[in-house]
């Protein structure tokens, strides 16, 4: 079974590719770069679920392949759940991880440790060319530090601290992040869907 990974985010591509390795009967993985003039899908939904479905539906319609899209982001308690679905563009256009972190740290300046709770959420949508739709979700709880630590991962990883590991997400190894992240949580639930689709194809 071939599959289309419908994301323009290189960090996500690396992580999802790694997670796909153990999936049985997987054929070729296609990427946005394999399709010239692939459009940037406007994320007009108000939830991760809606946006993940928008991206996966567009990919399935364009490529005729079983398509997997990820919509994810960071929810910060002290900001009422922001940046949420706006995580990628929190500091405006063009999207920029470094400026997003600067904006987040500025907004949280002076806020104490106990009020810096946050979580990463990930919605994975799998859409088949004949209209089948499957969505899974993963969550990872943590808190926002007041400075960056570590250089792994992407996005807000350098300021996202995991109490249990006493490390930021950017200080975990690639393998560790891929075992415990919100994306890993959503992906684990999607494996049975992929196995089921592979058997049908
Ligand atoms: O530190 C992080 N570690 C992660 O593991 C992670 N996952 C998501 N995010 C943030 O949320 C945005 C997603 O927005 P998003 O789902 O629209 O993706 P995107 O626009 O980057 O690519 P695409 O998949 O839409 O093409 C990203 O840009 C990041 O800012 C993360 N930050
Ligand atoms: Mg996006």
Image (spheres, rainbow, N blue to C red):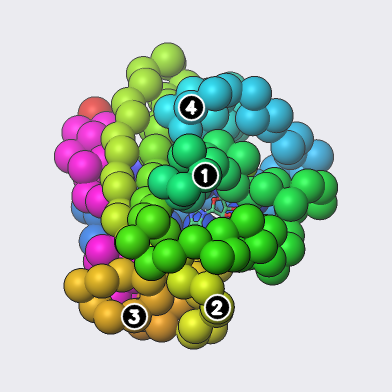
Is 192 included in the stretch rendered in magenta? yes
Task: Kindly report the distance in space between the C-alpha atoms of the residues bearing marks 1 and 4.
Answer: 17 Å
Residue 2: % across, % down: 42, 43
Query: x and y percent of residue 53 in the render?
Result: 48, 26
Q: Which residues are magenta?
A: 175-197
Q: Earlier in the sequence, mark 2 or mark 1?
A: 1
> Is the magenta region chiefly helix, strand or loop?
helix
Tell me how far mark 3 sits from mark 1, CA to CA. Answer: 23 Å
Residue 183 or 80: which is nearer the viewer? Answer: 80
Q: Which residue is mark 3?
A: 167
Examine the rendered structure and indicate whether residue 19 appears above or below residue 196.
below
Residue 138 seen anywhere in this rendered image of the structure: yes
Q: CA distance from mark 3 to mark 2?
A: 13 Å
Q: Neighbour class for label 3 at 10 Å: few (<14), some, many (≥20)?
A: some
Quarter of the image for the C terminus: give it: top left
Where residue 27 appears, x then y in whole percent? Answer: 38, 51
Please tell me which residue lies in front, 94 or 14: 94
Observer-side mark, 4 or 2, equals 2
Would you name the residue on which mark 1 appears? 79
Q: Please tell me which residue lies in front, 136 or 106.
A: 106
Residue 37 inside the magenta-drawn segment: no
Q: Quadrant of ligand 2?
A: top right
Q: Earlier in the sequence, mark 3 or mark 2?
A: 2
Q: Which mark is residue 47?
A: 4
Q: Report the residue marked by disc 2.
A: 147
At x 39%, y 56%, the residue is 115
Q: Residue 16 in the image: x percent, y percent?
A: 42, 57
Which residue appears at 47% of the width and 39% of the height?
A: 81
Give neighbour class at mark 4: few <14, some 14-19, many 20+ (Cα, 10 Å). Answer: some
């Amino acid at each position: 079974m071939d599959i289309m990974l419908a994301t323009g985010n290189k960090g996500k591509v690396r992580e999802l590719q790694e997670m796909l390795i153990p999936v049985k009967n997987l054929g070729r993985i296609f990427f946005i770069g394999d399709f010239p003039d692939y459009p940037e899908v406007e994320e007009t939904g108000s939830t991760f679920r809606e946006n993940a479905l928008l991206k996966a539906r567009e990919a399935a319609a364009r490529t005729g392949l079983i398509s997997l899209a990820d919509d994810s982001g960071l929810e910060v308690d002290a900001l009422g759940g922001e940046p949420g679905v706006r995580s990628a563009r929190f500091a405006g256009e063009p999207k920029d991880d470094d400026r997003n972190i600067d904006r987040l740290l500025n907004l949280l300046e002076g806020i104490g440790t106990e009020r810096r709770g946050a979580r990463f959420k990930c919605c994975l949508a799998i859409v088949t060319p004949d209209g089948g739709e499957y969505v899974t979700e993963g969550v990872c709880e943590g808190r926002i530090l007041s400075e960056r630590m570590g250089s792994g991962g992407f996005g807000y990883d350098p300021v996202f601290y995991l109490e249990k590991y006493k490390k930021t997400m950017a200080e975990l190894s690639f393998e560790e992040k891929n075992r415990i992240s919100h994306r890993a949580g959503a992906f684990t639930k999607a494996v049975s869907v992929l196995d089921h689709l592979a058997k049908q194809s």
